[in-house]
Amino acid sequence: MLPYLRKLLRFHWILLAVMLGLAAFGVCAIYAATYMRENTILVSSWSRQMTWCFVGLGAFFVAAMVDYRKWMKWGAAPLYLAGIASLIALSFFGTTVYGAKSWIRIGGFQFQPSQIAVFGAVVATAVLLTMMKKFPAWLRLLAVVALCGPPMLKIALQRELGGALVWAPTIGFMLFTAGIPLRYLLAIAITAAAAMPVAFNFLLKPYQRDRILVFLDNNIDPLGAGWQVNQSLIAIGSGGWSGKGFLAPGTQNDLGFLPATAAHNDFIFAVIGEEFGFLGGVVLIGAFALLLLSILSVAYFARDDTGRLFCVGAAGLLFTHMAMNIGMTISVLPVTGLPLPLVSYGGTFALLVMTILGIVQSVWIHRKQEGRAESEARE
């Protein structure tokens, strides 16, 4: 019992506080987005999210108390293979939601295999890059491409645009941190950019192509493909400087101009903008910035490459979700369907994010133990 108490006292309290604050704010935002609906399932979304957050909090503490080196040593292969297996299972047992076959439903429980796959890939990439630390950069890069390429391609072929786009920046940040020359990463980025016209014409579904066209011009289809984005912009703009107030009568969300099926998940930032205004949006983005800085501070003080790389991957994963979600609601990025971490409705994703942050916490807790081990080895 005493060792666990000592670990608890070494917590990165800012990281924990920001995580809890975002989760609590998310439950409130989901309630504000759904409390006036007639659909009882939507109305109860906030309570289900709160339940998942409590489950996620338990996973956070378990992940934090276990030495992260055990997670990396024993969990890398199982997590990676679980992600691959779930992606394969998606082809046979997947459920189509909003035009994409990206969910697996088991009873009343459903999850996105792409989220498990990218989590497993982050862990496996951190371990692989550490193991190959003394190998040439080009060989390490090829090894990571071989590791992450197949699941990323599988997600792309399933037409899950958002799930596929998360991989490149997340793994790219880890490669850069591992010392892969920037010219290699730029070459990959340029190649991917050159392939975009092919992907646009042959890989994307019609509704996904429409999202990109609407991003380029919001007036192309204002009553169809452009409806959600335009209503999101109106909602955020109508909030003004300080917003209309929590649960105060609004227009875009309360009257249903923001689609009920999207207001509490993909477009939750639009609801926040309408109720809390520009100041509320800035505070929320500031909270995310503090969370990301906390994760990067853990990476900086990590005593081994595996912990450092995992933290960078975790920060990259959360930053990409945050940037793409907020970006699509204010029309600076195409609509991708990515949730806002800890704030959007999505219990399994909240559980996954809290588990990831628990491992980050473990890197922080065990940094001094690692430092003592290195000191003893030198002596």
Image (spheres, grey):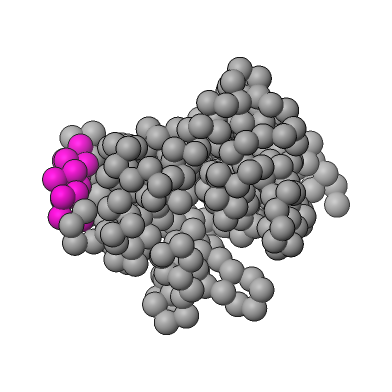
Q: Position of residue 6 (x, y in %)?
A: 79, 41
The part of the image, by quadrant, that contains residue 20 is top right
Identity of the residue drawn at 55% across and 33% down: 235
Q: Position of residue 68 (x, y in %)?
A: 59, 50
**Magenta part of the chain:** 186-199
Q: Position of residue 246 (x, y in %)?
A: 74, 32
Answer yes or no: is residue 128 visible: no
Is 233 in front, or is 280?
233
Image side of residue 345 versus residue 198, left or right:
right
Image side of residue 262 versus residue 136, left or right:
right
Identity of the residue drawn at 46% across and 75% down: 94
Q: Main secondary structure of the magenta part?
A: helix
Answer yes or no: is residue 192 visible: yes
Image side of residue 156 versus residue 37, left or right:
left
In reply to whether residue 67 is colored magenta, the answer given is no
Residue found at the far right of this picture: 1
Identity of the residue drawn at 59% across and 69% down: 110
On the rendered image, what quadrant is the C terminus found in? top right
Residue found at the far bottom of this picture: 92
Is 121 in front, or is 88?
88
